[in-house]
Amino acid sequence: MRSLVISLVLLLTAFVSDAADLAQLDRATWRQVKVYQLRELESLDPPPVGKVVGVKFDYRHERIRQLKPNWYQGSLWQVDWGQGQARFRHVTVLVAADALSAFQALPAEVRSRKPSIAYGQVLLDADAGFPFLRLLGTKVRQEKAGSVRLSW
């Protein structure tokens, strides 16, 4: 487990320097952003590593761990009602320290059932090989120049 946390931290340090780096996307990049149900994102092989995607979710898990002074790990969950039974799907997310309070403001109750969309960059843990999202925000604002700003 410790090696997993260390590899996540090293991966973040190597590929991602600042939470604001990707908060503004140019027009061409924004056109390529796809919004996925968690079921669809799970089934992608290979995952869209390095790309910014949107994920539909119902709630966030209450548990949030601090991986490093500037990064927190949590998860977004979606209830998939298939054939009368609930199946819970999730994606691991990393949140910058300056966005933690906004992340904590997301609904943490299973019963909330108010679907939302969160945007993030798909990254891959180098050792374990599982994808996770580096969250960028839940709100989209179109800029005059055609770019898009993601925020909380």
Image (cartoon, rainbow, N blue to C red):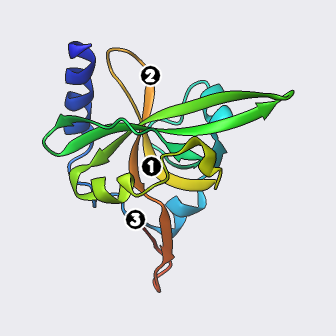
The kind of secondary structure element at disc 3 is: loop
**Residue at the disc numbered 3:** 152
**Residue at the disc numbered 1:** 120
Left or right, 146 with respect to 129, comes to right
Looking at the rendered structure, the kind of residue marked 2 is Phe
**Residue at the disc numbered 2:** 130
In percent of width and height, residue 142 lies at 51, 78
Question: Is 15 located above or below residue 87 in the figure?
Answer: below
For the residues labelled 1 and 2, the Cα–Cα distance comes to 15 Å
Foreground residue, 37 or 126?
A: 37
Which of the marked residues, 3 or 1, is nearer the chain's N terminus?
1
Which of the marked residues, 2 or 3, is nearer the chain's N terminus?
2
For the residues labelled 2 and 3, the Cα–Cα distance comes to 26 Å
Task: Give the image quarter of residue 37.
Answer: top right
Query: Quarter holding the C terminus?
Result: bottom left
Foreground residue, 87 or 110?
A: 110
Residue drawn where x is 52% and y is 69% of the image: 27
Residue 61 visible, this angle: yes
In percent of width and height, residue 143 lies at 46, 81
